[in-house]
Amino acid sequence: MKEKRDDSYGHVLKYTSIFGGVQGLNILISLVRNKIVALLLGPEGMGLVSLFQTTVNFISQSTNLGVSFSAVRNVSELFDAGDEARITHFIKVVRAWSLLTGLVGMLLCIVIGPMLSNFTFSWGNHTLHFVLLSPLVALLAITGGETAILKGARQLKSLAVIQVYSILSALMITIPIYYFFGQSGIVPVMVLMGLATLLLTIHRSYSLYPLRLTGAKGILGEGMGMVRLGVAFTVAGVLGSGAEFIIRTYLNNVAGLETVGLYNTGYILTMTYAGLVFSAMETDYFPRLSAVNTQWRSCNEIVNKQIEVSLLLISPMLVAAQFAIPFVIPILFSSQFMPIVDMVRILLLALYLRAIKLPVAYLTLAKGDSLSYLFLEAIYDVVVVLLVIWGYTHWELVGTGIAITLGAIFDFLMVFGYTYYKYHYRPTLPVMGYSALHIMLGGIAFLLATYADGWLWWIGGLLIFAASLTATLYTLYHKVALWNKLVSNFKRMFLRHG
């Protein structure tokens, strides 16, 4: 039984580390790009990028019908069955729906361009900008369909390579255009980045499954099941994008583009940071949970293991970040972004709750309970918008960090309460113990980093980080037999090269 348990924890740790490593490389490249963009455009330019990007994402998620999510399940089932003829045929269905939703999204962006301009900006006429951004909506839809095909066909290495090359392409596209054209280059950069990602994706997907136009007549009707599955996911995505759209528009209207840029930088910095650990959720954890969705004991076991590994891996990083933020922000961006330090420190506390809540939140999707998923997401989106407006009114940028953290607490309690009664989810004593310990260490780190100074700041920070890291390594040692695996790998390398 112990060997089986170790293997299970080892599997979670392995795939969380693999996908986290890929995400970490992408983040590293992105940070270089963001640093250069921040220097070339400043907070105001970053705010403009944020507004355009948020709006495009909102239109894209409103019109793509969740094909990029729901198609993964269908392609994966056919791939496991090994029926090449059915795979090839269904890929035509995915591509047809991706193209259709892309065209609809592009036309919608053009038609409602004046309304988007009036709602998003309190100054100037930006209708032409949204018209010029409309092709990006189509590019995102088509790329999403091809990415779903690669995920379903287990092309994880290809997806990782595409991500890395996409970020490198963005770096090469962004720097010269922003250097010569400044804010005028924002729209062309966004469209060219979308085109580069599409070309990289279809290069791989078309080599696996070449594009065939013959036999495509009447296949849209065959994808209705896939579309129905993705509708709830789409609506939830629309609500999430809509919430972010409303928040940024509110900040732009009451404070200006510079505040939007600062808020967006702080938000992305913390959420991207967490992506190192959370990136394995959809690729590895969600399929495993879906496979046992009718067995509540197995669901509980898988959810609790994922919570333990996610929390243990992210906790030392969050403690270190509390003290590193004042030094990291000028390096990654510029001294103009220092006002977000306190906001980011508060947001880091929300990530503890996110590490615990996210594995539980996947239960609704794994069980196909789309209405419950939509219900929970809708309530959270409304609450977080109201909290951010309230928080900024009272404490400006720091208030937005407080608001999002309060929203995370509300979301945590709501999801746990709902899954406790509806799906009989029960956290184990280790999960509750690790959660209490690491949240307590995170709280102490926040207080020291924010209010201490001098030797207490340095020594206290080192001690809290050492305590968090020790707790993580000690637990992983007993759960995963980590040291034995490391020693075994080292021995094999020594014998191979000896």
Image (tube, rainbow, N blue to C red):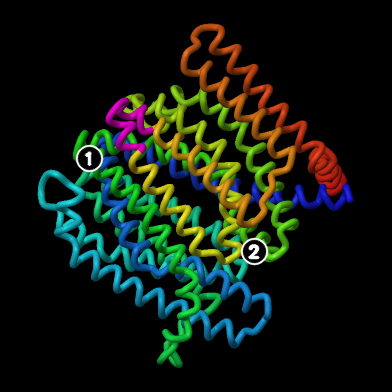
Looking at the picture, does residue 437 appear above or below residue 178? above
Looking at the picture, does residue 207 appear above or below residue 192? below
Task: Indicate the amino acid at tag 2.
Answer: Ser
Residue 197: x, y in percent? Answer: 41, 61
Q: Earlier in the sequence, mark 2 or mark 1?
A: 1
Q: Residue at x 12, y 44 (%)?
A: 123
- Do the numbered discs 2 and 1 sit on residues whose CB atoms are within 8 Å? no
Under tag 2, what secondary structure? helix
State the CA–CA distance, disc 2 to disc 1: 41 Å
Under tag 1, what secondary structure? helix
Q: What residue is disc 1 on?
A: 252
Out of 449 and 374, give the one closest to the viewer: 374
Residue 80: x, y in percent? Answer: 67, 75
Tell me the quarter of the picture where residue 476 sits. Answer: top right
- Magenta segment, which residues? 387-400
Report whether 430 appears left or right of 439: right
Q: Residue furthest top?
A: 455
Q: How many marks?
A: 2
Tell me the quarter of the picture where residue 327 sits. Answer: top left
Q: Residue furthest front?
A: 421
Q: What residue is disc 2 on?
A: 290
Report the disc number at residue 195: none
Residue 485: x, y in percent? Answer: 82, 44
Chief secondary structure of the magenta span?
Answer: helix
